[in-house]
């Protein structure tokens, strides 16, 4: 794989990726999150409702010697199980009990990987997650639903080794206009939810193989 170019969208002009930092409630837990898509990075830099311009930092990652887990190569349920380890799709006793069983059956041990690559669970994803755990979505339409969400692929830097192979291209720092790219972010999310709702309400959703039947 060699060296790859990645981008980090943020509200901060100065960023220093530090091993062990980050929020465990993010998609793949603690880590430093980036994307190969600079346009998505611009949207993610200004996705908060605060009217502040953002920044996109460019990085080079030397992947030689790194173990990379790519969720696009796994069953979609493995990805959902990973998210359930870190993020709650519902606040009910039923969900908490079923989520533990779901993770036990479909979860992957990610501790041996230096980098995790997979979809970014943005706002429109939570529409899917909440409907899925209520047994309103059939597994057979899950992948199509996620593609409608335009979630984007992100990389999460997890280990000290991976951090040591990440280098910022400081001269490539970009300022991101809030008005332009927050509008793009919101428009993408509104369109995604509309398309998702239409698919969930369509005949393609058989509501047979649902969350609580998967154990």
Image (tube, grey):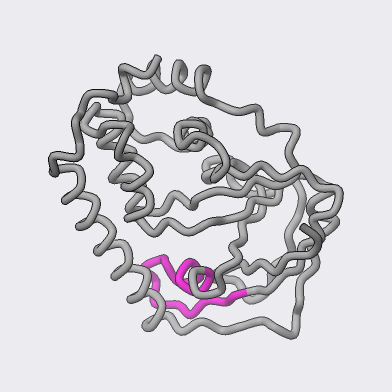
Magenta span contains residue 42: yes
Q: Position of residue 22 (x, y in %)?
A: 63, 49
In front of the other: 138 or 92: 138
Q: Residue drawn 57% across and 77% down?
A: 55
- Taking 78 as reference, is 18 above or below it? below
In front of the other: 80 or 92: 80
Q: Position of residue 46 (x, y in %)?
A: 45, 72
Point out the image quarter for the C terminus.
top left
- Quarter holding residue 88: top left
Q: Residue drawn 35% across and 55% down?
A: 149
Point out the image quarter for the N terminus.
bottom right
The image shows a total of numbered marks equal to 0
Q: Residue drawn 76% across and 71% down?
A: 168
The residue range painted magenta reads 41-56
- Taking 181 as reference, is 106 above or below it? above
In this picture, residue 140 sits left or right of residue 204: right
In this picture, residue 185 sits left or right of residue 64: left
Magenta span contains residue 158: no
Q: Position of residue 59 (x, y in %)?
A: 72, 69
Q: Residue drawn 60% across and 28% down?
A: 108
Q: Position of residue 201 (x, y in %)?
A: 13, 43
- Taking 10 as reference, is 208 above or below it? above
């Amino acid at each position: 794989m060699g060296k790859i170019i990645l981008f980090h969208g943020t509200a901060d002009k100065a960023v220093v990726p530090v091993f062990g930092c980050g929020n465990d409630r993010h998609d793949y837990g603690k880590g430093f999150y980036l994307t190969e898509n600079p346009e998505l990075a611009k949207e993610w830099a200004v996705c908060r409702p605060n009217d502040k311009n953002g920044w996109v930092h460019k990085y080079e990652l030397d992947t030689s010697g790194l173990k990379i887990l790519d969720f696009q190569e796994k069953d979609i349920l493995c990805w959902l199980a990973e998210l359930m380890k870190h993020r709650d799709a519902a606040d009910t006793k039923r969900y908490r009990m079923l989520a533990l069983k779901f993770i036990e059956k479909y979860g992957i041990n990610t501790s041996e990987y230096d980098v995790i690559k997979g979809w970014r669970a943005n706002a429109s994803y939570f529409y899917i997650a909440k409907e899925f755990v209520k047994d309103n979505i059939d597994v057979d339409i899950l992948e199509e639903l996620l593609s409608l969400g335009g979630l984007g692929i992100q990389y999460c830097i997890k280990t000290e080794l991976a951090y040591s192979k990440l280098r910022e291209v400081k001269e490539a720092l970009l300022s991101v206009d809030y008005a332009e790219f927050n509008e793009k972010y919101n428009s993408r999310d509104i369109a995604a939810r509309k398309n998702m709702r239409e698919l969930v309400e369509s005949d393609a959703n058989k509501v047979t193989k649902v969350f609580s039947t998967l154990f």
